[in-house]
Image (tube, rainbow, N blue to C red):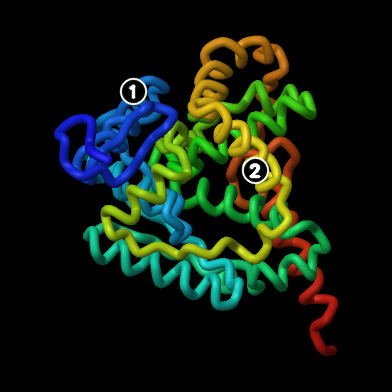
Amino acid sequence: MKCRKCGEKGVIKLREYNLILCAPHFLEFFEGRVASALRRYRLLGRCEKVLVAVSGGKDSLNTWYVLRKLGFAADGFHIDLGIGEHSRRSREKAENFAREIGGKLAVLELQKELGYSLPDLVKREGRTPCATCGLVKRYLMNREALAGGYPAIATGHNLDDEAATLLSNLLSWSTGYLARQSPCLPSWHPGLARKIKPLCEISEKESAAYAALNKIDCIDEACSYSKGATSLFYKDIINQIELHSPGTKIRFYREFLAKGRHFFAGERHEEKLVDCPECGLPTTHPPCAYCRLRGRIRAAEQANAPG
């Protein structure tokens, strides 16, 4: 197996591109694809700062690494959710990586922020773990970005994530979600940072290879709460199709963005936002969901206080 570009030993075969590449040329290919997505979808201006949501997994660390490699001012933000050993190791990987690349990493502990770890919060609220986690992460990431003057938040969603989500939304005709599915969720309020996905055209396989070749030490086990998630089911379906028809994932995603998304444009309604009376951040229903959560916690603590 030889690299198509130089004839040296190939390290990866990309069937969707009918391409075999050596390590240096694969790294060049990967970084070029990310740079191309940044330009094609107008994700990030050259002079803009970006805050990367860093979990400690390969995709978020790759996102941080490649943005810095491409010359962007990218800093990291990690939320320690308090999920036992998983969170301890995730934080350790994120902090070690920040030291290795000389990057700035802010860490927030949910236990200190709310007085509860995520597992305890899930028990207290009685909601699904992913719903509770999503609420907390979205709010805290946006708050951190605004406080630090970052106009954009970058997440590590890759092509597999995006294609699986697209398939799920199409099969359920979730037209509102289809209208919003994009590599960039723009800001429509000064109190909202826009969200971008630099790895949106990078497959899971490519991301794993990039991390391995760059010797990026990342956490490899999934969150314990992800077991049985429907997203894994749709990923399996899309990967089975990809196995029989290489290139399906990238064509499915790109062609939807180019030709399909506009059919759902009428389903996109940016709700009127007002300032939350408690934290000042924008919300559709004041107080915001995060402040309502804090209010329930305070009320429970007062009810259980002695005397």
In the rendered image, the vertical position of residue 110 relative to residue 127, given as above or below: below
Q: Secondary structure at mark 1?
A: helix
Pick the residue in front: 216 or 213. Answer: 213
Residue to which mark 2 is pinned: 236
Q: Identify the residue at horizontal 37%, vertical 27% (top origin).
A: 18
Q: Quadrant of residue 212?
A: bottom left
Screen quadrant of the C terminus: bottom right
Q: Picture coordinates of residue 247 (x, y %)?
A: 49, 26
Q: Identify the residue at horizontal 63%, vertical 41% (top origin).
A: 235
In the rendered image, the vertical position of residue 111 relative to residue 254, given as above or below: below
The crowd level at tag 1 (other Cα within 10 Å; few <14, some 14-19, many 20+) is few
Q: Identify the residue at horizontal 38%, vertical 35% (top origin).
A: 14
Q: CA distance from mark 2 to mark 1?
A: 30 Å
In the rendered image, the vertical position of residue 146 relative to residue 262, given as above or below: below
What's the residue type where badge 2 is placed? Asp
Screen quadrant of the N terminus: top left
Residue to which mark 1 is pinned: 39
